[in-house]
Image (tube, helix red, strand yellow):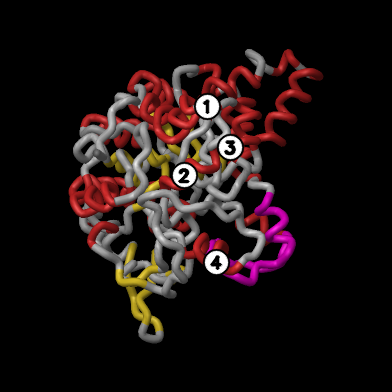
Amino acid sequence: MARQLSFPVFDADNHMYETTDAFTKYLPPEYEGLVKYVQVNGRTKIALRNVISEYIPNPTFNKVAPPGAQELQFRLKNPNAKKREPKPGDKVLTDPPKYIESPPAFFNPADRLQLMNELGLDRSMMWPTLASLLEERLADDVAATHAVVHALNEWMYEHWTYNFENRIFPTPVITLPVVDEAIREFERVVERGARAVLIRPAPVPSADGHRRSFALPEFDPFWKVVEESGVLVGMHSSDDGFQRYLNDWEGHTSEFLPFKAANSAFHQLVHNEWRSVKDTVHSIIGHGLATRFPRIRFMPVENGSAWVRPLLDNLRQVYAVSPESFDEDPLVTMKRSIFIHPFHEEDALGLVDAVGADSVVFGSDYPHPEGLFDPVTWVDELETLPEADQAAIMGGNLARLMGVDPAAKAVA
C-alpha cells in the first residue's frame, strides 16, 4: 500500500489505453476504413485514411514502457537528482525494464480502481492516450472528425463510463468544427454523467480549410451550454497542429512525433516555450471568452507550467499600456478562469507564488513513462507549504472543480 496522506488525493492526469476498436466499433458504415490497424515489418501501426502514423510507436499498447520509467532512470543515474528519505509505503527505486506487458488496469475501470487503491489515489481524471492524434490528421474533413470523435466517446462510455463509482472520471472528447454538432455531442456526454470534457488546445479547423480560435464569438452558442452545465473544460496536451509551423522553419513535412529522440535544437527551443498552450490561454483571455462566460473553468493538463509566468508578465504589460482592449483586468480573468497542472519536475513552489495554491492541481501522468512511478510522493515538493495548501493542490482544488466533496477520502 502506498504512502497514506491525511487528505484526499485527486489526480488530474491519469490515462487509459485505448483498445484497437476504440475508434471503429461505433463508427458509421459510411466511414468504414477511415481508421485501420496495419502490419509494417511485423509491427502493428495505425493508419487514418490509409496514411500510416508513427505518432505513437505501438498503438495497440500491448507492451508499453513502465509507468514513470523516465523519472526512475533520472533519479537512479543522475548525481544531481534530488534525493529524499523514503517514507512508509513509498516504492523502492529500481531500474525499470524497457517494456512491460500492459496489465488489465490500463484498459478497464474495475482493475484500475484496485491499482489506484495500491497507489494511494482517491480519485483520478482519466484521459485517452491515442485519441490525441485524431483531430489533426482529419483536419480537412470536419464531418469525419465529428464522426470518429463520437465513435470514441461511445466506446469510452461502454468501457469506462464517464463516472465510475465517483472515483474515476473519464473525459469524453468534444471537437468543435461544427458548432451544432459540438453542442449535441456535449449534451449527450453530460446527460451520461460526464463531469469534464477534453477540448484540444488549438485553433479549430473549418470546412473551408481555414482555422480559427475557439474563443471567437462564433462559438458562443457552444460555450453558453458549457457554462450552464458547470462542466470543467480540460485542455489536455495533444497534436495541436503546431508541427505545421515547425515544418515551415525546418524545411520538411513530417507529422508530429512526440517520442522522437533526435529533434533539432531549434525544435527543442521552440517547444520549450510551450507556445501552443500559451497562445490558447492568451486567446481565451484576449478574445474575451473568459469574460463573456465567467463561470467556465479551463484546466490545461500535461502542458506544464513554464509558460505561466511569461504569460502573466505579458498580460500585466499589455494591460498597463492598453487597458481599453480588455473588459476586465486580464490577471483577474486568469485567476478566476484558468487552473494549472505543473509537470512533476517543475518548480511547484514558484508556480504557487505566481498564481496561488488555489489555482494549482496535481497530476501524475500515470501510467505513462514520462510521468510519476509513485504518484503520491509528489507531495514532498510541497512540504514547505501549509497543510491546507498541500491538501488543496493534491486534490481539493480539483474536487471543487468537479463537484466532488473535497474532504472525502476513498482510500482507507
The span from disc 2 to disc 4 (Cα, nearest Å) is 29 Å
The span from disc 1 to disc 3 (Cα, nearest Å) is 32 Å
Horizontal arrangement in the rendering, residue 316 relative to residue 401 (left or right)? right
Q: Nearer the viewer, residue 388 or 36?
A: 388
- The residue under label 2 is 236
The picture quadrant where one finds residue 11 is top left
- The residue under label 3 is 280
Q: What is the crowding at mark 2: few (fewer than 14 residues within 10 Å), some, or many (at least 20)?
A: many
- The residue under label 1 is 386
Which of marks 1 and 4 precedes in the sequence?
A: 4
The picture quadrant where one finds residue 210 is top right
Image location (x, y in percent) of residue 254: 59, 67
- Return the mark for residue 285: none
Mark 1: amino acid: Pro
The span from disc 2 to disc 3 (Cα, nearest Å) is 12 Å
Horizontal arrangement in the rendering, residue 384 relative to residue 102 (left or right)? right
Image location (x, y in percent) of residue 351: 62, 35
Q: Is residue 234 above or below residue 49?
A: above
Which of marks 4 and 3 precedes in the sequence?
A: 4
Mark nearest the camera among 1 and 2 is: 1
